[in-house]
Image (cartoon, rainbow, N blue to C red):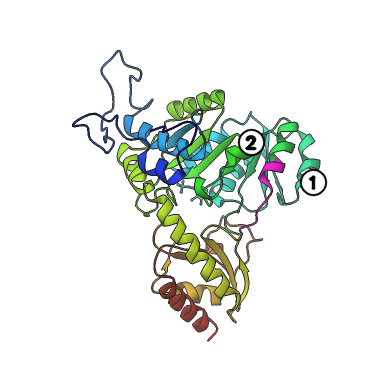
Amino acid sequence: MTGDPSRPLAPATRLVGSGRPPRSPGASVSPELAMTSTYVAGGDVNYARVGNPTWSAFETTLAALEGDDSTRALAFASGMGAISATLSLLPHGGTVLAPRHFYNGTSGLLETWVASGRARLVRIDLSDTSAVERALPDGVDVVWIESPANPTLETCDVAALTRCAHAAGALVVEDNTFNTPLGRRPLDDGVDVVVHSVTKYLAGHSDVLLGAAVTNDSSLAERLLTARTLGGAIPGPSETWLALRGMRTLHLRWERACANAAALAARLEQHPNVVRVRYPGTGAMIAVEVDGGQSAASAVEDAVDVWLPATSLGGVESMLERRRRHALEPESVPENLLRLSVGVEDVDDLWRDLDAALTGSSA
Ligand SMILES: *Cc1c(COP(=O)(O)O)cnc(C)c1O
C-alpha cells in the first residue's frame, strides 16, 4: 500500500493497510500464516530460516512506520534477539558508549562481552551532549541510545548526539521500544539502526515475544540479515502473525495509554506518599519513588488490584513493578522506584487502585 506519493499516508492508515496481500477478487485480506520450513526450489527464498511471507508482511508494516520506501525492517525471535544481532556488528574488542541506565538485558549482555574481552563498555550521561562529544574521540564504535531510558526515564538530544557520533565515525543505535514509531522516528534524526522489543507496545497484548531491527542503510540491512540467518534467532510465523494483528490497533492503544499516563502523572505529582515522579512528558511510562523506601514500594506491588504486579510493559493492561527486585538492575536505580506501564483501562479506575495502594503503603 503506497498511496499518492505527493501526499504520504498517515501512520494510522499505514498501520491498518500495510503488509496485506495483493488486492484481487477472492484474495484474503489478512496475510497468510505461512507454516513451512522450506520452499519449492527456484524461487527467491529457498529455506525458511532465510525468509517467510508472514515475516515480510510484519516487516513491511513496521518499515512503513519507522521510515520510507528505502527502509528495511527485520523481525527477530525477541527484542534481545534483535539487540544481539545488532551488537554483533561491533568489531571484536570494540567500544560501546551507552547511557548510565538502559534496559538491563542489553547491559547484562554487554557485561558478559566485557568479561570475555569481546567488547568495551563506557557508560555516560547521554543527556550531557558535550560530555559525549568529549568521550567520542576515544575510539567509540557504537553509541547505544534509549530515550527515555528504561527504567529511570532520562532523555537525551538524539539528533545532536547522532551528529557528534557520526563525525567521530561511530554507528548510532536507538532502542525505540518506549516511544514506538508513533512517538518518535529515530531514523529521521539520522540514527543508523532502530531496535524494538515488539513484545511491548507494537504487539501490545502481552501474549507474544518478538523483536525487530530497522535501518535505512542497505549494507547494514544485509549484515543484519546475515546475522539473523546464520545466528538463527528467527521468529516463529505464528508469533509474527500475532504481532502484526496486534499492531493494527497501535495508534488507538497508544493514544489512550498516553492520555491515561499524562493524567496519572499529574495526579501522582500531588500524592503525599510519592517523593518523586519521573515522566518525560510523552509516552505511557512513568516511574515513581515511593515514600518509605523498598518496603513501601513492595507494599504497593502487593496491594494493587486493577494494576498487575508484573515485569514487562506496553500491553493493554496496566502493570507496575519495583525494578530493583531484579539482580541485574544497577544500584543507581532507587530501591523505592516503581516503574508504571500505563495501559488502556478507564483512567479513574487506574487512579483509585493506585491511590489506595500508595495510601496504604505508608500504614
Ligand atoms: C523488554 C525490552 C527489551 C527486550 O525485549 P524482549 O522482547 O523481552 O527480548 C529491550 N529493550 C527494552 C527497552 C525493553 O523494554
Query: The disc labelled 2 sits on which kind of residue?
Result: Gly
Residue 172 drawn at (x, y percent): 64, 37
The nearer-to-camera label among 2 and 1 is 2
Quarter of the image holding residue 35? top left
- Element assignment for label 1: helix
Name the residue located 70 percent from the left edge and 49 percent from the top edge. 126
Residue 281 drawn at (x, y percent): 60, 61
Left or right: 230, with 99 as reference point: left
Quarter of the image holding residue 189? top right
**Can you say whether 247 is above or below 346 in the image?**
above
| Residue 241 in sight from this viewpoint | yes
Q: Which residue lies furthest to the left in this view?
A: 26
| Residue 311 in sight from this viewpoint | no
Residue 29 drawn at (x, y percent): 26, 37
Query: The disc labelled 1 sits on which kind of residue?
Result: Ser
**What residue is disc 1 on?**
130
Q: Which residue lies furthest to the top in this view?
A: 42
**Between 216 and 68, which is closer to the camera in this rendering?**
68
Dot 1 alpha-carbon crowd within 10 angstroms: few under 14, some 14 to 19, many 20 or more = few
Contact, CB < 8 Å: mark 2 with mark 1? Answer: no
- Element assignment for label 2: loop
Q: Does the magenta stretch include residue 212?
A: no
**What residue is disc 2 on?**
190
Dot 2 alpha-carbon crowd within 10 angstroms: few under 14, some 14 to 19, many 20 or more = some
**Between 146 and 62, which is closer to the camera in this rendering?**
62
Of pointers 2 and 1, the one earlier in the residue sequence: 1
Bounds of the magenta segment: 153-161
Q: In which quarter of the image is the N terminus?
A: top left
Q: Is residue 154 magenta?
A: yes
**Between 182 and 298, which is closer to the camera in this rendering?**
182
